[in-house]
Structure formats: structure tokens, C-alpha cells
Image (tube, rainbow, N blue to C red):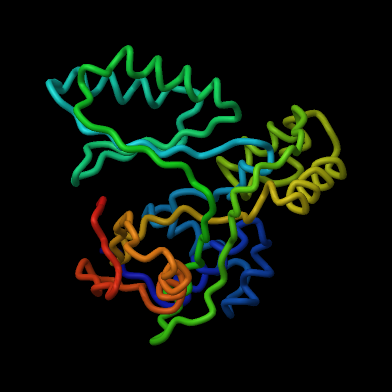
Amino acid sequence: MEEIDIKDKKILYNLSLDSRQSLTKLGKKVGLSRELVKYRIKRLQEKEIIKNFITITDSSTYGASFVRFYYTFQNTSPSIKRDLINYLIKHKNTLIIKQIEARYDIEVQYFFTKVQEFRSSIREFKLRYGDYISNEFFSTQLDAQLFDFNFLLGKQKITNRDFLNFNGNVGNINLDKLDIEILRTININARTPTTDLAKNFVTTIFIVNSKIKKLREAGVIKRFGLDIDFTKIGYYFFHVDIDLKRYKGINELIEYYNEKFVVNSPKSEKLKGFSTNRKYD
């Protein structure tokens, strides 16, 4: 585990809320000079605690939907698994692939803009690899709340966490070619300077700034965030799918996670009153 101090944690927290902010602005928030902030960020990157500066977007605003599949393998070999995973990696609609140790062997997250596209993609996958799948489960994301990393600040009690709402309402925002190119670039590195974006796309700084501003106002860009390897600083993440026996408790459950359920130990608290039938590491 990498040793970092509270200043580093404050840098991580504030970058997770806005990773495009200036070093001067960030320095004022954490009580360090611009040069010291720059040095600490570089060190956090070298330690691979900061994996990437990301752009968090809401794909539903331009008509895309998330679909999450879980698969259990059968009759496979290392080469078959490698071929299957490489196929998914190269698939244009694949967002995330996770190899897991639980009821299922792999989780795949796709995004689609059309039902026909979803149908044909899943059908093609099953024609290729259906013989190696013994069980599957899938779900769509209706809405979601993405909480902040307030726990990094070392507070004994966590309340009123900042969060992003993804309500899943399918929109009809039309993205032009420049919008898409800008989103692709800042998703790889949210701190890409505006001057570089303008130069790469043969346009002006004013147009790039205007595009980003409009994408934020439209809700396409939710936040400029941070991809952190929390395992390097002593945190353990568990993905838990919960089947509710009483759906009326959904708000109670969300509030529970909002205010309490953050621990930096592999041993987690038991959530009373709810059925946790499915657990995925």
C-alpha cells in the first residue's frame, strides 16, 4: 500500500470533482502552492494512484442506453476465453469488461442507441460463443446516483455527500462530429488543454470552449472526474447487486449508502432489512 498524506487525499478529492480545474485554483483549496500541487499530482501518477483524468458523461442525453450482462463460462480453455474477451474488447459497443469471482465469471457493460443494434450485437455474440456460456443475466440502467469520494477527507461521519444524478431519461441531443471528437479526447484525458484541442481539430479556442460549455449545460458532460486505483491507498471496492424484498425501502437504502456505508476494510457492515442475494466482487 502506498503512503499518502491528507494533502494528497485532498488533491485526489478535489480533482475527482473537477479534474480540469487549474493548478492555482486547486492549490488554494488544499493549501499548497501551484508548483507543489503539480509535483504531488505527478507523484500520484507515477505511483499509479491516479490512473486517468476522465470525463463523466450521461449517454442517455443523446439516446444511448446501458445494458449490463453477466456470463458464466462452460467447456472453455484459456485460448477460448482469451478469444472471447478479445472479441468483446474490440466490439464497438463495449464499455467495460470485468473478470469476477462470484456466481458469474465475467461482467460486460454495453451501450446502444437502437434496439435493433442491441439485438443484432447480442445475437452475433451468442452465435460465436453461445456454446461456452452456461448461464447469463442482464439488466438495464434506469437511473443511478454517483457519490463523491468524501471519505478521502478522513471525516469520522460522512453526511450530505455530493452526487451526480443519472435519471435515465432518453434525450434527443444531436452531437456533431466536433462534439464527438472533443468528448473522445477529454474522456481519455480530461486535462487536455483547450489550446491542444483547438489545434488538433483545426478550430479556435473560443469554439472549443463554447462546445464544452454547451455539452455541460445540456447534461452530456456531468463532471470532469478522476480514475483512482483505491487499492493502492488501502480501500477495497465491492460490487453488490441487491434484490429488494420490499421495494418501498429503496429510498432508505440510498440514504444509508449516502451517509454511512463507506469503509476502508474488506470487512463490511451488514445491511439490515435488505436481501443481498447477488454479490459480485
Q: On the picture, is 231 further left or further right than 32?
A: left
Q: Nearer the viewer, residue 86 or 31?
A: 86
Dividing the image into 4 quarters, which one contains the N terminus?
A: bottom left
Q: Residue at x 50, y 27 (%)?
A: 93
Where in the figure is residue 196, as x and y percent of width and height?
Answer: 72, 39
Above or below, comparing residue 7 to residue 127 in the picture: below
Between 70 and 78, which is closer to the camera in this rendering? Answer: 70
Residue at image point 39% right, 57% down: 49
**Quarter where residue 241 is shown:** bottom left
Name the residue located 20 percent from the left edge and 70 percent from the top edge.
Answer: 267
- Residue at 48% in and 70% down: 251
- Number of marks present in the image shown: 0
Tell me if 39 is positioned left or right of 205 in this view: left
Q: Quadrant of residue 187?
A: top right
Residue 8 seen in render: no
Q: Position of residue 18 (x, y in %)?
A: 62, 61
The answer to whether residue 269 is seen in the rendering is: yes
- Residue 50 percent across, percent down from the top left: 44, 55
Q: Does residue 243 sit above or below 196 in this rendering?
A: below
Residue 31 % position (x, y): 58, 80
Question: In this rendering, would 112 be left or right of 244?
Answer: right
Q: Give whichever of 187, 107 is nearer the camera.
A: 107
179 is higher (above) or lower (below) than 27: above
98 left or right, relative to 134:
right
